[in-house]
Amino acid sequence: MIRPPHADEHAPYYGQYIAQVPTDRDFFELMAAQPGDLNTLLQRVTEAQASESPAPGEWSIKEVLGHINDTERVFAYRALRFARGDSTPIPGYDHELFMAGTDFNRRSLRDLLDEFEAQRGANLICFRALTADEIDRRGTASNNPFSVRALLYVLVGHAIHHSASLRDVYKVGG
């Protein structure tokens, strides 16, 4: 099991995601289960429902999935760089800029779910193979210190956070 990161391993903002990761389950089993959990959660959602915003200024379900995918890719890249010993500071990630740069609603719900499953699968293969020393390595992203461990916890906690939002705000999976 990978222990939860300490507060000095990440920017304070990311504590909200890290705190959502259960510590009573094997970390990589939880990470591996998330694509299937998301598929189950959204199994009854139609393409039309997935493209609708629940309120003005809110993202559609497809946009939430696109954001999860973008964040998975960005944070996995950061984790890989740091795990490999590259401590070159990495600039920030503006999720609103990423959202404005594309139209996730033109894609199918299935395509967005498949993208998450493929990315997560590749990330699992990569990150399960890390040594304890590699998981402990640190770098700087968005002018904040991060350990590889913290970045992995953010990936899992971020997916948990948005899955809860899909259930609570978008009323799916119920």
Image (cartoon, rainbow, N blue to C red):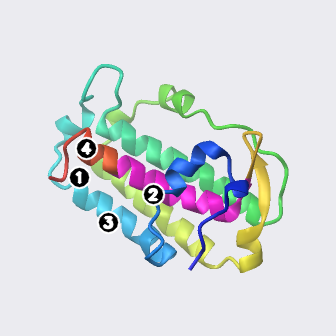
First reached walking from the N terminus: tag 4 or tag 2 = 2
Amino acid type at mark 4: Asp
The nearer-to-camera label among 1 and 2 is: 2
SS assignment for the magenta stretch, majority: helix
Point out residue 108 in the picture as x, y percentages from the top left corner.
Answer: 29, 44
| Structural distance between the alpha carbons of marks 2 and 3 | 18 Å
Q: Specify the label residue 97 is tagged with.
A: none
The kind of residue tagged 3 is: Gly
Residue 63 in view of the camera: yes
Q: Residues within 10 Å of mark 4 (few under 14, many from 20)?
A: few
- Provide the residue designation for mark 1: 42
Q: Residue 20 carries which label?
A: 2
Q: What residue type is labelled 1?
A: Leu
Q: Earlier in the sequence, mark 1 or mark 3?
A: 3
The residue positioned 26% from the left and 38% from the top of the image is 169
Stretch in magenta: 146-163
Q: According to the image, label 4 marks what residue?
A: 168
40 part of magenta stretch: no
